[in-house]
Amino acid sequence: MAAELWGWGSVVLVLMLVFALLLGGSRCLRRRYASDGARVFPSGKAAAVAAWASGGRALLVTAHPDDEAMFFAPTVLGLRRVGARIALLCCSSGNYYNQGEVRKKELEQSCSLLGIPACDVTVIDHRELPDDPAVEWDTQLLATFVLKHVEANNINLVVTFDAGGVSGHANHISLYTALRYLHSERKIPEGCHVLVLQSVNLFRKYISILDVPISYLLPGDALFILTEEETEQAKRAMQCHGSQLLWFRHIYLLFSRYMVINSLQLL
């Protein structure tokens, strides 16, 4: 019995130490790195994205309502900080559990909190683009939708998932495949660039702002780090998606680095 109590005591002690590190580390790292909320590494090809600061138009391409807050809030708030106007193209209504209409309303509320007006939010509800983690969406169909949106709205920056899709979701990865196709085939208009959100391993994914030094050291073209106030704004946006806030997503809100940090690469 004593050994069992000691074992549980050790687990509790470790959890308390981790929590203390997150609290203390969060304050120190925010003071050190997040004072301006967004950082761009303007070397090499990333220098071409200077249009962000001069009233550029960015298009965030997501798969489901809640992706914009759950994964991309640092990018959205960071781009707004440097003067970009952001539009959202959500490629499904999130109807996996027949909640599509509810989720579209939640999306509009979330985007409002993130500074994306309803007039700049577009939801594609196409039968060949179902919300389903087992379905890879058609590359040509997706590419057509994205390209039409880019051309119609004079977009000079597109942001989406990378080949890992952050969570490995097939719909997320399909977006990367479509943008990669448009980029490799040189179909994207001249002057428009594509940034993809870097997927990280499970350890880094759940150490919140403690991942900042690692993100700084690893290669990347843009790094967005939220201030404490902006982080609360991102969390409020995610909380708009009440239909999706199962118990494990509350843990995600507390510990995921994607609520605080986005590191991205240019295609």
Image: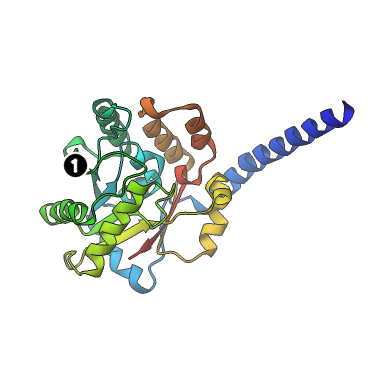
- Name which residue lies at 18% across and 52% down: 141
Q: Image quadrant for the N terminus?
A: top right
x and y, in percent, of residue 217 in the image? 54, 64
Which image quarter: residue 213? bottom right
Outermost residue, bottom direction? 44
Instruction: Name the amino acid type tagged 1.
Output: Asp
Observer-nearest of 229 and 242: 242
Judged left or right of residue 222, residue 52 is: left
Q: In the current view of this chain or complex, which residue is farthest to the right?
A: 2
Q: Which residue is mark 1?
A: 120
Up the image or down, 113 lies above or below 36; here it is above
Q: Quadrant of the C terminus?
A: bottom left
Judged from this view, the residue extending furthest toward the left is: 152
Give coordinates of residue 251: x percent, y percent: 53, 33
Q: Is residue 226 or residue 180 the one in the foreground?
A: 180
Could you tell me which residue is drawn at 25 percent across and 47 percent down? 86
Kindly identify the residue that appears in the image at 35 percent across and 57 percent down: 196
Residue 6 visible? The answer is yes
Q: Position of residue 167 (x, y in %)?
A: 44, 47
Q: 10 Å neighbourhood of mark 1: few (<14), some, or many (≥20)?
A: some
**Left or right: where 258 falls relative to 132:** right
